[in-house]
Image: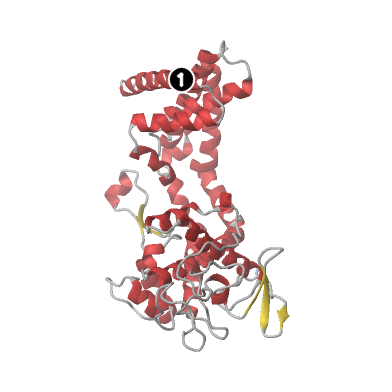
Amino acid sequence: MYSLFSDVKKTDREKRKEHAKLWSEAGLDTLYDRFLQVSEILNFDLNWLSLTEMFTALSLSVDFELGLREFDTFNLEFKLDLPSLDELLKGIWTHIEPLTVDDVYRDFKKFYEGIELPIDFTLDYTNTVNEFLKRKIPRGGVEFARYGISRYDESVYAPEGATEKYPNTLVPLIKSSSRPKHIVEMLKAYGIKEEVIDAYLNRITLLQKSLENGFFLGFNILGFSKFPPREGEYAVIKITDEVKLKIKTLDQAFMGFILGVSRLGVDRFTSRKTSIFTRRAGYFAYFRALLQKRRFVSPLSILVHKEKYFGMREVARSRRALRYGMMRNIQYLIRGMIKNYLKNKITDPFELNKYVLAGTEIAFKDYTRHKGIRSWKLRYTDEEFKQMWLEKWVAMGLNRNILEEIYGKVILWKDQLKRLLQKNLI
């Protein structure tokens, strides 16, 4: 039997715990202590992400003759500004302004090299080449390599007599389930074929394994990257149990042609002596990771969770706790109503819980808050979302007719709850 009183008590306990953990005076101090405790773990994660994303983006910039700003997938930068006195009195504690990679690079040049770039400076293709490459090289696939004629970094490998730029030859190094979605979607937006996308995803794997099992100046993480074994002049980098690369430069690992691994017509012949990239590429990646770490452990970071004075002292006067409790109450109410509606139709508790989860997804379709990953839902009409929702849960083994019933009921309950909230009756 569903008990609304029981759920209200449960929500009240959760609300008090959340307030004590995040929005109280002691909670803010504890939160900052937690930031400090995980700072070293964060340092590794940020350097890992920043280095691999930076060099992946540079290889794409070279291949498509587009600036780094077009492939800036690791962009977490923002600026915190203090509010005015009037805003402070209104309870606005801080401003958050997103920054572009151009903004961050201007700060990097001033900090590391003492050079102040103009405010309109952007990392378009020309500036990307000037800042991160030792010389301009043509985009990928310009010509097939010819011995004694073609230059390193400016030609790709193909068998004699080949006419197709992208023949179907590739050894996948990553499983399809681990494909980074943001990279895949970005490449699809540029009209890249699915089979060629796999070649670029291989580069990410090669970069990550080179970072773990190799040690390159400007591309390493102290305490994690390993000095690889050597065979003559070559470093031996373990990629998988079956694939071990003998390389001299980082270029060879992530954009050079590797027999049996690379896709024909995509990866280049690279120099075995020097890298085409400047040291600045790695330094900029380290700089971006350092910015994130410093911001995370800054005392200003906890201002994001700061309440007004009385809201920190008393849970009943905390707006955030009130909002949290209201949403939890609505969630429990919807879940209880679905269970009550299906109690004579579904006896298996695991099956029943699936329908409850499906119904809750409908109830909170429009609830995105600051989560950008949920904003895609708002691009679809109610009918389009309903069809996608039905296909998703039917594929998980649920009955379409019951799902249709739940959809109608939840939409009705949702509208009734909205009217009650607007009248301040709940």
Residue 2, can we see it?
A: no
Q: Is residue 278 left or right of residue 343?
A: left
Q: Residue 95, relative to residue 344: is it above or below?
A: below
Q: Is residue 100 left or right of residue 349?
A: left
Q: Quadrant location of the N terminus? A: top right
Residue at position x 52%, y 80% in the image: 270
Q: Quadrant of residue 330?
A: top left
Q: Which residue occupies the foreground of this view, 415 or 250?
A: 250
- Image coordinates for residue 31, horizontal then vertical, percent: 54, 49
- Image coordinates for residue 333, horizontal then vertical, percent: 48, 21
Q: Which residue occupies the foreground of this view, 284 or 420?
A: 284
Residue at position x 49%, y 22% in the image: 400
Q: Residue furthest front?
A: 161
Q: Which residue occupies the foreground of this view, 256 or 133?
A: 256
Q: Residue 300, relative to residue 149: is it above or below?
A: above
Q: Quadrant location of the C terminus? A: top left
Q: Residues within 10 Å of mark 1 (few under 14, many from 20)?
A: many
Q: How is the image coloured?
A: secondary structure
Residue at position x 61%, y 59% in the image: 41
Residue at position x 56%, y 13% in the image: 345
Residue 229, can we see it?
A: yes
Residue at which label 1 appears:
406
Q: Element under label 1?
A: helix
